[in-house]
Image (cartoon, grey):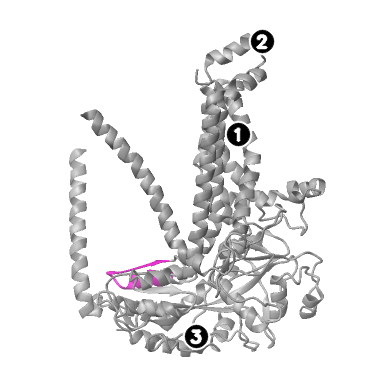
């Protein structure tokens, strides 16, 4: 017994020593030859080493899939992503604790200046990476093809329309018989990028019905708050005559129904194709305060197109344009090249996200390529 | 020599706890300063919570209200049940039942609060309509129980029921221990004088145990005030003072911190810490009051003799 234990300890110590040796040689070699592993994934040469990242929880599932795929293809690479929230991620980035941060909104203002300190005195850049659609999910027995306009949606979420038999709802749903039942409206009780994008869409398309300032905290009165998208999805699922907003992936995994949205160009059902078409109308609006090659985007929430879904969200990776640490740059660059590649992006639609439109994909790849 | 070393060690331990408390207080104050400085609302009377707006506008009125009322309702439900359970275990139940019941209550205290939260959200809430509608129909003339919107989910009342279940084991287990401390001679004396069991409990057990029961209650209250995740899952998190506790509404200090922390901006974080400071002070005051009550009752209970 005693012998067995001491052997175990010895083995453990030896393994530890090997790991230490491994670490030190890794960081040395990887900066010289990124192709040390020899493998390739999505057009990116494998890099080795360890990087940490943190931020947006909306990116969590995408990151998990990407990291698994990358680490399988590239031996000796370890990427850790902790989904601690966008603000926490940006703070970690500023404090030089992570190689890159995931964020539901582009970094701007003071934060760019604060972050410059860790990026060799140049501000970092925002790179759009993970797109998504926000679905208006509802629970109405016998109704499968609800249509909502921005105005009606805003009035429902602002408690001006409180019953499903409201004439305004009947007007946009002429062929559907809606019940005489109070609307149970669910929103997020926690701060969230989903709320931010959802309220931006309402503020942009129905400013009269939605007078509030868009933001990650819910500002309207009334309705019911649930924690997290999973909470909203569960609430809608268990409450008859309810409506809520969640990322598209929750509609698919929870077996919920999603309304078609009519921005003026006809009703559009949310799915990966219509959402990618919606994202194609987003414009690159580089922030002059950010580093060179910044890809801050402006989503066109008012897009009127019978094939483009308008309630969208776009999340970013925030990285140093220059001044990346020598031991993290190769892996950061290689990993982000993979995630921006067609191979990386096409993986997204299977897990409820929305791939970036082709043209943007190229711009993102160029931005990643220029990191130094 | 050994004595002196030990005295100094214990003194050091005592001082360490004080320093720790002071350090926590100082940290909270320091981190809360930006929020107090930039706030354009009244920190104590504003109900809204927009710390990341420009200019920041927020206050803790709704949070303080929600924290207080959910804890009070939880105490109203939990304390009688807990004391009843403790008395049953101590004086009525057979030894076998008492042992297993005591064990089950101890296990109840060990269930993580997230489990209570999920259970409250996904099981209890679906079965609360009956009682909340009954309260509205028959006691609706009391504003507290009136429901004007016809939706009974995600309410302070449901959160309070879950809180009550969470603090019940704490209060019950401590009360049980206190009741068991009642000297056998006291109990036997009252029985010998012809008291029934209920009279014995009323005259010998409860007066002796009162300070202990009060401190158990205050410990339970402390847990209810600070409970975070279970409340965050259940409440609808509205920043308004709503006396109708069966309507979806309500928010507490701890739940609000848990919900808003991840996406809060710089002032938002500072504002959350400021609200945490208030909770810290409230908890301190509650405990000081409890101590004061215990100290007062000890002198007169005659239990020390």
Marks 3 & 1, CB-CB < 8 Å contact: no
Q: Residue at x 43, y 62 (%)?
A: B31
**N-term mark: 1 or 2:** 1
In the picture of the structure, the residue carrying the numbered disc 3 is: A297
| Chain of the residue on which disc 2 is drawn | B
Q: Is residue A370 above or below residue B261?
A: below
Q: Which range is magenta?
A: A65-82
Is residue B12 highlighted in magenta?
no
**Labelled disc at residue B194:** 2
In the picture of the structure, the residue carrying the numbered disc 1 is: B82
Same chain letter for marks 2 and 3: no
Position of B193 compared to A31: left or right?
right
| Quadrant position of the N terminus of chain A in the picture | top left
Picture coordinates of residue B212, whole percent (x, y): 53, 30
| A312 or B215: nearer the viewer | B215
| Chain of the residue on which disc 3 is drawn | A
Picture coordinates of residue B155, whole percent (x, y): 67, 54
Determine whether the residue tagged by mark 1 lies in a helix, strand or loop: helix
Q: Nearer the viewer, mark 3 or mark 1?
A: 1
């Amino acid at each position: 017994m005693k012998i067995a234990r001491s052997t175990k300890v010895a083995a453990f110590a030896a393994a530890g020593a090997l790991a230490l040796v491994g670490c030190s040689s890794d960081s040395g070699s990887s900066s010289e030859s990124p192709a040390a592993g020899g493998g390739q994934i999505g057009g990116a040469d494998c890099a080795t080493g360890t990087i940490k990242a943190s931020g947006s929880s909306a990116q969590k599932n995408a990151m998990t899939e990407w990291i698994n795929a990358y680490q399988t293809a590239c031996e000796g690479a370890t990427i850790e992503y902790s989904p601690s929230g966008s603000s926490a991620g940006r703070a970690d980035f500023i404090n030089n604790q992570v190689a890159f941060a995931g964020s539901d909104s582009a970094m701007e203002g003071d934060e760019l200046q604060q972050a410059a300190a860790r990026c060799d005195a140049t501000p970092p850049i925002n790179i759009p990476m993970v797109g998504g659609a926000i679905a208006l999910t509802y629970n109405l027995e016998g109704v499968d093809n609800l249509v909502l306009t921005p105005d009606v949606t805003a009035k429902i979420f602002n408690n001006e329309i409180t019953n499903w038999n409201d004439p305004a709802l009947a007007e946009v749903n002429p062929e559907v018989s809606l019940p005489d039942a109070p609307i149970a409206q669910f929103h997020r009780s926690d701060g969230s990028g989903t709320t931010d994008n959802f309220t931006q869409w309402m503020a942009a398309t129905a400013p009269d019905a939605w007078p509030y300032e868009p933001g990650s905290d819910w500002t309207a009165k009334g309705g019911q708050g649930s924690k997290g998208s999973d909470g909203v999805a569960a609430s809608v699922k268990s409450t008859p005559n309810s409506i809520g907003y969640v990322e598209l992936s929750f509609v698919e995994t929870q077996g919920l129904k999603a309304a078609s949205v009519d921005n003026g160009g006809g009703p559009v059902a949310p799915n990966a194709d219509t959402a990618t078409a919606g994202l194609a109308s987003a414009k690159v609006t580089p922030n002059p305060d950010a580093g060179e090659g910044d890809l801050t985007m402006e989503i066109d929430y008012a897009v009127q197109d019978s094939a483009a879904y308008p309630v969208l969200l776009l999340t970013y990776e925030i990285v140093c344009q220059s001044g990346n640490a020598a031991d993290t740059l190769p892996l950061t660059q290689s990993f982000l090249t993979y995630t921006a590649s067609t191979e990386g992006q096409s993986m997204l639609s299977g897990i409820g996200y929305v791939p970036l439109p082709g043209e943007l994909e190229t711009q993102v790849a160029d931005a990643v390529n220029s990191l130094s | 020599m050994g004595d002196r070393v030990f005295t100094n060690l214990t003194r050091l331990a005592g001082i360490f706890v004080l320093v720790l408390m002071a350090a926590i207080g100082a940290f909270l104050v320091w981190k809360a300063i930006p929020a107090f400085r930039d706030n354009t609302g009244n920190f104590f009377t504003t109900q809204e919570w927009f710390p990341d707006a420009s200019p920041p506008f927020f206050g803790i009125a709704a949070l303080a209200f929600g924290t207080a009322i959910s804890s009070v309702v939880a105490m109203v439900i939990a304390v009688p049940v807990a004391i009843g359970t403790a008395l049953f275990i101590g004086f009525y139940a057979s030894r076998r039942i008492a042992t297993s019941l005591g064990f089950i209550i101890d296990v109840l205290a060990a269930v993580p609060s997230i489990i209570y939260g999920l259970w409250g959200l996904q099981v209890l809430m679906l079965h609360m309509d009956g009682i909340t509608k009954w309260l509205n129909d028959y006691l609706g003339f009391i504003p507290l129980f009136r429901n004007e919107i016809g939706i009974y989910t995600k309410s302070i009342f449901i959160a309070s029921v879950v809180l009550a279940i969470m603090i019940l084991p704490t209060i019950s287990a401590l009360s049980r221990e206190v009741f068991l401390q009642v000297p056998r001679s006291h109990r036997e004396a009252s029985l010998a004088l012809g008291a029934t069991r209920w009279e014995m409990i009323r005259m010998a057990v409860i007066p002796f145990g009162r300070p202990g029961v009060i401190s158990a209650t205050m410990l339970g209250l402390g847990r209810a005030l600070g409970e975070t995740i279970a409340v965050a899952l259940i409440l609808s998190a509205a920043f308004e003072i709503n006396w109708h506790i069966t309507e979806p509404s309500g928010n507490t200090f701890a739940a609000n911190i848990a919900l808003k922390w991840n996406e809060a901006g710089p002032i938002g974080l500072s504002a959350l810490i400021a609200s945490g400071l208030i909770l810290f002070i409230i908890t301190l005051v509650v405990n000081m009051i409890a101590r004061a009550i215990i100290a007062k009752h000890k002198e007169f209970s005659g239990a020390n003799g």
